[in-house]
Amino acid sequence: MTFRTNGEQETIELGYALGKTLGKGAVVSLRGSLGVGKTVFAKGVARSLGIREAIVSPTFTLIQEYEGTLPLHHMDLYRIDGVEEFELIGGEEHLYGEGVTLIEWSEKIQELLPDETIYVTIALADDGSREIRIEGSTL
């Protein structure tokens, strides 16, 4: 399904709607270029899990963990080189955990992603809106 959002709030609301459908062990791949709104979308997912603390891109920490109705593991793999480095930081354990895992730049570890991964691809349209395609979800 493809959605169009205008502004940060609508993108957060779409993330919230997806988040409400996620259960234990859900993995969501967030794809798109730098600054397109992946972390903004992640804020909505976090809110759906009752997380009220600030959600920031974990570019330098790689994995940020939050406690909500389900644990949230937010990963940003922009700075890793691939599967081997991902395994060295212990990232694979989050792919099959009890919480929800959001992964920015997941294409770097594509071969490790579970078959049930939900793919969210975000692109900026010419008019400044975001085009958001969600695959693998009943949203």
Image (cartoon, rainbow, N blue to C red):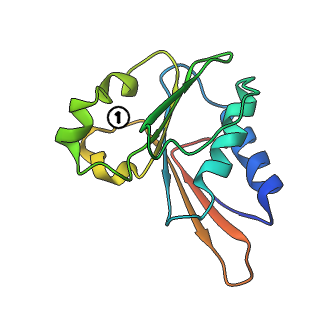
Q: Is residue 20 visible?
A: no
Q: Quadrant of the N terminus?
A: bottom right
The quadrant where residue 51 appears: top right
Identified at 21% across, 31% down, the residue is: 88
The quadrant where residue 66 appears: top right
Picture layout, residue 60 above or below residue 116: below
Q: Amino acid at mark 1?
A: Pro
Q: Which residue is mark 1?
A: 114
Q: Secondary structure at mark 1?
A: loop
User: Of all residues shown, which one is farthest toward the bottom?
Assistant: 126
User: Of all residues shown, which one is farthest toward the front?
Assistant: 60
Seen from the viewer's position, the closer of residues 138 and 117 is 117
Identified at 66% across, 78% down, the residue is: 125
Q: Quadrant of the C terminus?
A: top right
User: Of all residues shown, which one is farthest toward the left?
Assistant: 84
Q: Give how far across and how far down residue 27 sits, in percent.
A: 47, 34
Identified at 17% across, 40% down, the residue is: 84
Q: Give how far across and how far down residue 99 sits, in percent.
A: 52, 20
Q: Is residue 135 visible?
A: yes
Picture layout, residue 108 above or below residue 47: below
Picture layout, residue 19 above or below residue 134: above
Q: Give how far across and how far down residue 35 sits, in percent.
A: 58, 64
Picture layout, residue 56 above or below residue 64: below
